[in-house]
Image (tube, helix red, strand yellow):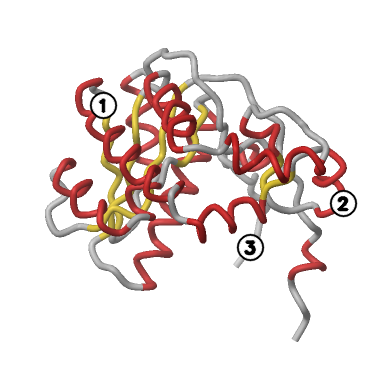
């Protein structure tokens, strides 16, 4: 037996790991070419999970109606609002100090001193305002990718995550941005309506992602691995 060297084939998705982000901004409205949509959904193919694409404007408006209904329920839930506020970082100093959560600039919001942002949050964070943002985001997007799984169990939750990550990397490699609008699956009573709208049958919608074209946004900082994983 003789052994020889073999070149390593670079995976085109590898470099996308460093560029991938959830881009929480208004997109530019351009459609994604059919070949790119096929490449993105093929990359996302895993056992037990399917990707349903919604690119027609009438159906996107129907999905938006569910997003707005679920978003309204979340904004009116004090527990949800409290947790959201806990994870928001309103200015660079907070973001650098804590290195977690969601930096306000990532969503296109202004940077404010903590002593202004904290008391003002309850005044400016309203269902009307947030729903208007959702509408602008959806209507500027090229479509939705909804990840549906065959069963509601831990194995299939993982498969949904794996499928999404592959979709996101393929999209990034093609210059396509994406962001979550998961409200209809986060508020449980809207999940069956979403499944029916998409013709998903008995399958379970787990993730709702919009996609399209936009410039990158600022990134949230993250703590080093040593801060969040303890050696056994």
Q: In the picture shown, does residue 136 fall above or below 83?
A: above
Q: Nearer the viewer, residue 149 or 105?
A: 105
Relative to 46, 124 lies left or right: right
- Quadrant containing the C terminus is bottom right
Residue 126 screen position, x and y as percent: 50, 37
Q: In the picture shown, does residue 159 fall above or below 200?
A: below
N-terminal-most mark, 1 or 2: 1
Q: Residues within 10 Å of mark 3 (few under 14, many from 20)?
A: few
Residue at 80%, 45% (x, y): give it. Answer: 95
Residue highlighted by disc 3: 2
Residue highlighted by disc 1: 61
N-terminal-most mark, 3 or 2: 3
* SS for dot 2: helix
Residue highlighted by disc 2: 97
Quarter assignment of residue 59 = top left
Q: Residues within 10 Å of mark 2 (few under 14, many from 20)?
A: few
Q: Residues within 10 Å of mark 1 (few under 14, many from 20)?
A: some
* SS for dot 1: helix
Residue 57 screen position, x and y as percent: 25, 20
Residue at 64%, 25% (x, y): give it. Answer: 216
N-terminal-most mark, 3 or 1: 3
Q: Nearer the viewer, residue 192 or 204?
A: 192
């Amino acid at each position: 037996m003789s052994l020889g060297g073999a070149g390593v084939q670079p995976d085109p998705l590898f470099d996308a790991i460093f560029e991938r982000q959830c881009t929480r901004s208004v997109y530019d409205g351009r459609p994604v070419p059919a070949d790119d949509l096929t490449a993105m959904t093929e990359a996302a193919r895993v056992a037990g999970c399917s990707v349903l694409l919604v690119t027609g404007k009438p159906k996107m408006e129907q999905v938006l109606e569910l997003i707005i209904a679920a978003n309204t329920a979340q904004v009116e839930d004090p527990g949800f609002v409290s947790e959201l506020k806990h994870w928001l970082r309103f200015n660079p100093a907070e973001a650098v100090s804590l290195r977690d959560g969601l930096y306000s600039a990532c969503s296109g919001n202004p940077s404010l001193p903590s002593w202004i942002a904290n008391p003002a949050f309850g005044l400016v964070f309203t269902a009307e305002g947030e729903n208007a943002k959702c509408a602008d985001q959806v209507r500027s997007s090229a479509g939705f990718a909804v990840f549906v799984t065959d069963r509601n169990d831990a194995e299939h939750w993982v498969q949904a995550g794996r499928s999404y990550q592959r979709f996101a990397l393929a999209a990034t490699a093609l210059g396509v941005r994406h962001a979550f609008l998961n409200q209809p699956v986060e508020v449980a009573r809207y999940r069956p309506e979403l499944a029916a709208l998409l013709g998903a049958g008995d399958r379970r919608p787990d993730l709702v992602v919009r996609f399209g074209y936009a410039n990158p946004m600022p990134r949230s900082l993250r703590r080093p691995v040593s801060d969040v994983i303890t050696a056994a």
